[in-house]
Image: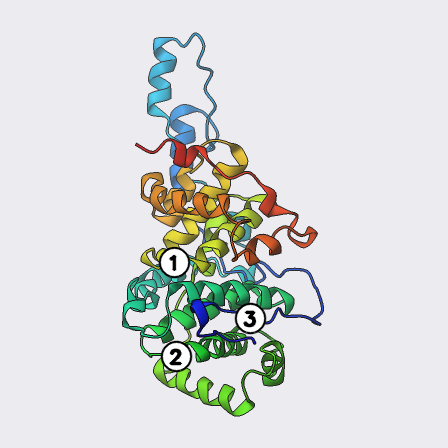
Amino acid sequence: MDHISDENNQTNFVKPTNFQEGGAVMGSRKFGQETRHNRRALSVINQNLVGAKAYPCVVNKRGLSEEEIEMEDIVEEPVVDIDGSDAKNPLAVVDYVEDMYAYYRKMETFSCVSPNYMAQQSDINEKMRAILIDWLIEVHDKFDLMGETLFLTVNLIDRFLSQQTVVRKKLQLVGLVAMLLACKYEEVSVPVVGDLILISDKAYSRKEVLEMERLMLNTMQFNMSFPTPYVFMRRFLKAAQSDKKVELLSFFLIELALVEYEMLKFQPSLLAAAAIYTAQCSLYGFKQWSKTCEWHSSYSEDQLLECSRLMVGFHQKAATGKLTGVHRKYCTSKFDYTAKCEPAKFLVETLP
């Protein structure tokens, strides 16, 4: 039995099998970067004032003279121009990237749903939602779909459930159709309806899939263009000048957050920033949030701490309980065994 059962509010989904394993596609969609002339001008001013390169300074704390102490107070960590290297790349559209992200920040509030929308549902709850999304993350991996597709799938599920009452036996159908719609929007090669019926162990007919697709599109008025955390992840990872380890751990943390209903209270951009901040803290062993990250995300470290500490908690318990799909996914060589990274416990141990 694959769909949500009535007994003890348990949900059992058929594990997706017989699909070709493949490399993860993360970050395949790149957005352009814009040349920031004002930042370059700031860099020049800093260099003229202090005679140093426009990069974070490491100051020797031993034996500082008064003059050196005054200089340390004057010099602040500059904002790095993350788009300059792409100025000659026409695909990077550096002239528009800041406008694009300003628009995303404006529109993200419209993509958010009420963090209490489950209260209007009489037959499903947040635990069932978590089971569904945990299973869909595994399906997404088995189909080797793009990163954007997963985040849009979850967005569609929440937006639909916030407007439409659904019985539990139809919840898995909602998830499958949301993934189908996300594939049609993001993917080049889209899974056919028959594939979705197969992974649901034929719990639904082709007619039911198409009827749900029509209902979901009409409910959301065919609007599929809201920004998800993914678009902010790509930009903020660039601002963090991240390597592959930071990137993979950031996606591991934010996928853990996707499963949790309580994380709906955070905007997509804040979720993305907190995931990257938490990943850096986990890997480096100390708090790490540069001026460049703060500038591009518009979030200070203090603004990220609440969300980040929740992510640390999810990381600590990722391998326990019944919902371990994300942990299993990131415990493979395909994702460089990222889930085995130690969580940033010091972030929660230093709570006031």
Instruction: Name the residue at 42% across, 43% down.
Output: 293
Q: Which residue is mark 3?
A: 13
Residue wearing tag 1: 268
Amino acid bearing label 1: Pro
Identify the element where label 2 is drawn.
loop
Name which of mark 2 and mark 3 comes first in the sequence: 3
Picture coordinates of residue 310 (x, y %)? 39, 46
**Residue at 44% of width from left, 24% of height from top?**
51
Q: What residue would you read off at disc 2?
A: 167
Q: Which mark is residue 162?
A: none
Q: At which x and y percent is residue 151?
A: 48, 64
Is disc 3 placed on a helix, strand or loop? loop
Can the viewer see residue 44 in this picture? Answer: no
Where is residue 147 drawn, in percent x and y? 55, 63
> Callout 3 environment at 10 Å: few (<14), some (14 to 19), or many (20+)?
some
Q: Is residue 347 above or below residue 307?
A: above
Crowding at mark 2 (Cα within 10 Å: few <14, some 14-19, many 20+):
few
User: Considering depth in this image, is 322 or 56 the residue closer to the camera?
Assistant: 322
Residue at point 37%, 29% (across, down): 76
Q: Is residue 18 visible?
A: yes
Question: Upstream in the sequence, badge 1 or badge 2?
Answer: 2
In the picture, the quarter occupied by the N terminus is bottom right
145 vs 127, nearest the viewer: 127
In 3D space, how far apart are the residues under numbered discs 2 and 3 (Cα atoms)? 16 Å
> Alpha carbon of mark 1 to alpha carbon of mark 2: how far?
28 Å
Decide: is 267 above or below 5: above
| Total residue callouts | 3
Q: Identify the amino acid type marked 2.
A: Val
Mark positioned earlier in the residue sequence (1 or 3): 3
The kind of residue on which mark 3 rests is: Phe
Which is more foreground, mark 1 or mark 2? 2
